[in-house]
Image: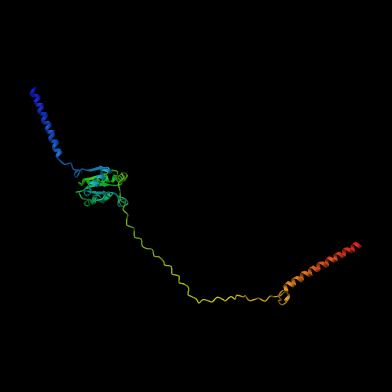
Amino acid sequence: MRMLFSLLFLSSLFFAALVAGVSAAKGEQPTPPLPSFGNGCIDKCAEDIYKMLTEEPSQIILLDVRTEAEYEAEHIQIEGVETKNIPLSEIEERLNELNKSKVLIVYCRSGARSRQACEILAQHNFTVFNLEGGITAWKAAGYPTTVVHPSPTHVPAQTQTKTPTQMPPEATPETPAPTVSEHPAQTPQTSPVGVPGVPGFESIFAVAAVLLAVSLLRGRKWRNQKCERKRWRA
């Protein structure tokens, strides 16, 4: 029995030593911060991607696989990080523009196209990460984007028709204004009924006419009274 227990004890020690050796050997190997080449596409949230971009900017290529118009409207750009815009349909034709010694972080609008691009790149031994949720999730997390303003289209200048400058009228000699006499010329007064103008004649004529009218009225009144008296006598 003692021998059996001794054998079990030794076996346990041996197994423990074996496990400890394997663990030590594993602990001595450095864990790389990024996966090795050819490990496929790994989805990362916006927070993790931002941390990678800011901690190791020189070791990363930020690849936008949207169209050129989408890229010009808005894209992600971090200081020190190399950026590329290669649409998904052109990925396989432009692989030579990408550096395999760097890590690729791929994104699109919502994460669907970038996922397809990651799978293609992984097949060509690129180390790739996919921004989960795309630029939409990136902005929702509060991270900055850059807007590219396209160069303005050259518009030919419109020919402006110049309005001919109106020339001032030729100077004409000034006509001297007629001299107005301070005392206006007296117009000879025409007396009624062809009588030469006599000062005060109009007033005399008017008074005479009134007196004549009064005389006629008195004469008519007197005649009327005389007729009435005759009637009473009769």
Q: Quadrant for the N terminus, please.
A: top left
Looking at the image, which residue is at 89% across and 63% down? 229
Query: In this rendering, is residue 102 above or below 190?
Result: above
The spot of residue 97 in percent (x, y) is 22, 52
Above-or-below relation of 79 to 193: above
Residue at the spot 26% in from the left edge and 47% down from the top edge: 106
Direction top: furthest residue: 1
In front of the other: 7 or 86: 7
- Judged left or right of residue 4, residue 100 is right
- Residue 29: quadrant of the picture: top left
Coloration of the structure image: rainbow
Q: Position of residue 131 (x, y in %)?
A: 27, 44
Q: Residue 232, how many percent across, how many down?
A: 90, 61
**Residue at 78% over, 69% down:** 211
93 or 63, nearer to the observer? 63
Rendered image quadrant of residue 214? bottom right
Q: How many marks?
A: 0
Q: Quadrant of the C terminus?
A: bottom right
Looking at the image, the residue that sits furthest to the left is: 3
| Residue nearest the viewer, comparing 71 with 93 | 71
How far across and how far down the image is residue 231, in percent? Answer: 89, 62
